[in-house]
Each structure stands twice: as C-alpha cells, then as structure tokens.
Amino acid sequence: MTNSADSAAFAAVALSALPALLNGDPAHVRRGSHFTGGILVGVGAADAVLRIESGRIVAIERGATAFDFGVRGSLEAWSAFWQPVPAPGHHDLMAILKAGTMTLEGDRRRLMAYLQWLKDIMAAPRRLPRS
C-alpha cells in the first residue's frame, strides 16, 4: 500500500470479499459451525459487523451495530496486516495487539473460544490480488 487512499480502498474491498473468500471453504465453515452472531471489524474510523450464521458470513453491516466480539485497528495497522507476506510484528492479530495499534472488544470468553477462526477470517484478505 502506498498511501492512505489506496489503503482505505483496499480495506473496503477486503471486507466485501470476505464471504467469497471464506464461505466456500468447508474447513473454515466447519471450525465456525457453532458460531452465530456478529463480529465487529473496525478499520480506522469505519466499522463493519460481519453477520455469521453457523460459520458462514451472511451479511456485512456498515457501522457499529450489535456484535458479540470484535477487533478494531488503525488503517495503517490493517494495511500492514493484510500484506501478502506481513512484516514481523504485523503477521498476527496478537502481535499487533501487543504493539497497541489494535484492540479487542466485546465478549472475551467467546472471542477466545473462536480466536483461531477469527484470525483466519481477518487474514483471508491477504489472498486478494493487489493492483
């Protein structure tokens, strides 16, 4: 990513692409099959809630509507995290949380129960082509 406009555009594409990237992956859907609810994804000032039913993303709602748990970060943090091969310290949500540029919100117990599944959701945009 070269500038914030490119980063913001990619973030919008990344969130919109999540259903196509993940719903067709039987292993991913199976790991989340007991989860139905909302996951907040905050990218800079923009919030979106992924509506999940039995492990499948069924809708993406713009704005911070009701959610079970979520992750919020700066546009720069997400941009670094979504690189095809992220730099050390930006390769994992927990590493970025430690750096203080992302935060976790909501029901921590439920989040921890689905942590690896959440990490897989958030890392999926790395597979998108770059312009």
Image (cartoon, rainbow, N blue to C red):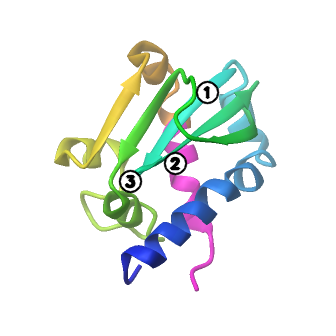
Which is nearer the N-term, disc 2 or disc 1?
A: 1
Residue 43 location in percent, x, y?
43, 52
Q: Which residue is mark 1?
A: 38
Quarter of the view holding residue 120: top right
Q: Amino acid at mark 3?
A: Gly
| Image quarter hosting the C terminus | bottom right
3D distance between C-alphas at marks 3 and 1: 19 Å
Q: What's drawn in magenta, residue-wise?
A: 118-131
Can you tell which of label 2 and label 1 is closer to the viewer? 1
- Dominant secondary-structure state across the stretch colored magenta: helix
Q: Amino acid at mark 1?
A: Gly
3D distance between C-alphas at marks 3 and 2: 15 Å
Q: Point out which mark residue 9 bears.
A: none
Which is nearer the N-term, disc 3 or disc 1?
A: 1
SS label for mark 3: loop
| Image quarter hosting the N terminus | bottom left
Quarter of the view holding residue 79: bottom left
Query: In the rendered view, would you say 43 is above or below 97?
Result: below
Q: Which residue is mark 3?
A: 44
Residue at the extreme left of the image, as rendered: 99
Asked if the magenta segment contains residue 84, the reply would be no
Question: In this view of the protein, which residue sits in the foreground, 87 or 2?
Answer: 2
Number of numbered callouts drawn? 3
Residue at the image point whose x is 52% and y is 34% from the top: 64
SS label for mark 2: helix
Q: Which residue is mark 2?
A: 122
3D distance between C-alphas at marks 2 and 1: 14 Å
Q: Amino acid at mark 2?
A: Met
